[in-house]
Structures are given as structure tokens and as C-alpha cells.
Image (tube, rainbow, N blue to C red):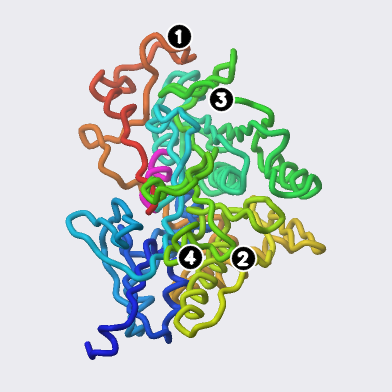
Amino acid sequence: MNNDSAKAPHVVIVGGGFGGIRAATQLSKAPVNITLIDRRNHHLFQPLLYQVAMAGLSPSDIAYPIRSILRHQQNAKVLLDEVRSVDVKNRTIQLIDSTLSYDYLILATGSQNSYFGHDEWMKFAIGLKDLDDAVEIRRRVLLAFEAAERETCPNERKRLLTFLLIGGGPTGVELAGSLAELARSVLACDFRNIKSSSAEIILLDGGKRILSAYDDSQAGKAQKQLEKLGVQVRSQTRVTKITADGVVLGSEFIPSATVIWCGGVKATPLTETLGAKVDRAGRVEVDKDLSLPGHREVFVIGDACVFLHQDGKPLPGLAPVAKQQGQAAARSIADDLSGRQRKTFCYRHQGSLATIGRRAAIADFGRIRLSGSVAWLTWLFVHVFFLIGFRNRFVVLFNWFWSYVSFQRGARLITGQRLNAGIPEPSAPTAGQPAQAADCAVSPSAQSTPGQVSQAAETPPPKASS
């Protein structure tokens, strides 16, 4: 390292998501030294995470090593580590076993699942925030069909083939539609004792309708497309309890062995160490240039911040928002170094897309609103185009084409360590719970020992995204 490089300002970027990667690449020609820190070694294309959860794609199709992305950027290095806290007064961050100083700091730590004060639900209703979550959801869904195949009790079989998705946002809608296609088309000829098409897929939402961020017309079209696929959509429905046996909705109980949480997110705990004002979701309220109030050298972007300087409403938690904010934060640093005045951040809305299933999607580009096959093709093009790496684009496009013409999904692998005596077991009804399966005389081969039930029900919570 030459003297000029050693004296260059040190920019630390925490998080290798859309915002962090965009900030790092935007500073590629700036006279700075960059350290990008993430607890994982890969950049994840989160909009396609549900495709991994529903066995449409493999994890490697939507992830790319961060070091490979920045391999040609000489002023950037990557650390595989975790940031525990930030000391804005001394301009240092605390890693797992070391401390790192900075001249500029960009926090792009993303979000994690929020259970709205009911963290005890976490072990029964898994959320979808990272690859580990996606693989675990895939495991639980496929295991439910396998368990139903050998189940002799009709009530227990019905519980195993009932899938509950809580939250009617884009993630819940996409998961529900993809799960319906998996059950009714992909697995239709794979089993002998059950009809996979008999699976009940129920999408629950507490609001007046699903997809509240879209207009009424688009949301209505999405619901019709879901119902056409066989998904039951229930709005204005409040979940009061989740157990290993199912979900309680006030006085109603729905038995289910597989519950997926799509209900909400919150910022990662790192934002709480800044000593700044945060909203109910833990997001930092930033200034007009995305900097931390009172600390112009610290920027908070993406899902970790709440920006209220544009129409007074928080910006949506979308990839384009994080990308534009990452670019803006990098531009502000470059402006400081060049003696220019910083610009106020202004988000340029590029449209919203949500896919429901095969040739079914909605797209909102302001004045232009699409649905059906045209929206689905638009969604396909946009998502493939923004994947990082030529190999990823080619593999995803080929897999989707093959799935479209053959109704097959090649990533239907059951993986994971939570196995009982070599045989995977879904969660079983616990004593004293109102599971309908209690009236059945289950054959010895279908029974689980108490130890097996405990191990299946007490699954660890999903890890938070960094």
C-alpha cells in the first residue's frame, strides 16, 4: 500500500445487500479505502428467495460471492465478520473479537422478521429472510407431503396438507401462489396414497385486503389469480396464537403442520447501538442526505432507516430504494472529498411487481398497470436482468423455461440436520391441544415417540439477516 492509499479516508460499509454493494461499487474510483463487512460471504437476490423456498431454484442460483463482485475493485476489501455495536463518538465499530475505526460509515444491515411482540411464535412459524430460512421452508413443505403419504388418519393427513401463510404482502402472495403450483402441478404424479392437489393453502392477512401497497384494482386482480390457483385468501383476520398444532384466530382454530410467517419485518438490533431516534420497527430516522442526525460521517440506508423527507411517508422496503440510497450515500462521500455540497436524497419510483404463479402477476409503473401474462413476462425479464453474474442469469432463465414447459422443479431436495433416527418427522400434535387428529387411531408405524415430537416442534428460530 502506497502512502497516498494509506492516508485515504476509510469507508466502512456494513452489509452486502443491495444498498451496501451499490455504495461500494459507486466509490470504485473515489480516493478512499473501503472495507465491506458481512456475516455471510454472499450477496443475496432477495426478490427470488421465495423461489428457493418453493423448490423452483437452488440457493446458488440467487446468491453470488461478495468477493467475486468486488474482485476487480482495488480500493475495496471484504471481511467475513459480524458488527456487534457502533461507537459514533469515537468512530469505531465493535466486531466479534476486534475493533475497527472509520472515517465514514454506511450501515446497510437490512431487516429481520418481526413477530409484533410474540417472539414465542418464531419456533412454529418460520419467516423468510435468508437462504437458511428458504431451505428450511422447503424442507418443512416437502416433509409435510411425505408425512401425509404414510399417514393413515384422515384428520391428521388433513392437518399435514394444510399450509398457513400469515401476511398478505408481496412475500406472502408470491409464496402462496408458488406453493399452490407446487401442490397442484409439480407434485401431482409423485405420490400414490395422497392427492397433492388436495392441499389447503390459506393466506391470512389482518388488513382489509392483501397487497395494501398496491391500488384496489391491482390487489383485487391478484386475489382473483390466487383463488384461481386454489389459494384461500382471508383478509381482516387476526392471529392470536401459533402452536405446533396450528393457528388460533380468536375463537377459531386451524390445524396445520406448516406455518410460514410473512407478517412483518423490523430493523436489525445494530441500529439501537447508534443512540439515535428510531421508529417502532427499529429504523433510524435519517436526515435529508441519509446521514445520522448530528453525525454527517454516518449514513443509514435501506431497511435500516426510515426516510420521511419525501411526501412525509416512509419509503417502501424494496431493492430499488436500497440501491438508490447506497448510490446517494456514496455520492455524498465523494462530494465531501471534492468540496461540493451534498444533495438531498430523492427516491425515483421505478415500479412495483409481484408474481402470483404461472403466467400470473401484477405490475404497477404508475400510469401503466399490468396483470396476467404480460405482467409475468415483465417480472421475469426484470428479475433475471438484475441478477448478478452471467451464470446466475443463464441458470435462472433456463430453469424457469424448463419448469414452464415441463411443470417440473429440479430443486425438490429435502436437506437439513433436524432428523429423527434418519427419518424426518414434521411437528406432531401435542397433548391437550385441539388438534382434530386426536380422534384417530394412528397405526404404530405412523406414531412418533415423545422425544421425536419434542425435537420436531422445538425448532430453532430463523437467523436474522445481517
Where in the figure is residue 80, as x and y percent of width and height?
A: 26, 63
How far is the residue under mark 3 from the one under mark 1?
A: 25 Å
Circle 2 sits in a helix, a strand or a loop, which is it? helix
**Please, what is the three-letter code of the amino acid marked with disc 1?**
Asp
Where in the figure is residue 400, as x and y percent of width and height?
A: 54, 63
Magenta stretch in the rendered image? 131-140
Other residues around mark 4 within 10 Å, as few (<14) / some (14–19) / many (≥20)? many
Other residues around mark 2 within 10 Å, as few (<14) / some (14–19) / many (≥20)? some
Sequence order check: which comes first, mark 3 or mark 4?
A: 4
Mark 4 or mark 1, which is nearer to you?
A: 4
How far is the residue under mark 1 from the one under mark 2?
A: 47 Å
- Residue at position x 39%, y 9% from top? 432
Q: Are marks 4 and 1 in contact (CB under 8 Å)?
A: no
Magenta stretch prevailing secondary structure: helix
Residue labelled with disc 2: 380
Does 134 appear in magenta? Answer: yes
Residue labelled with disc 4: 19
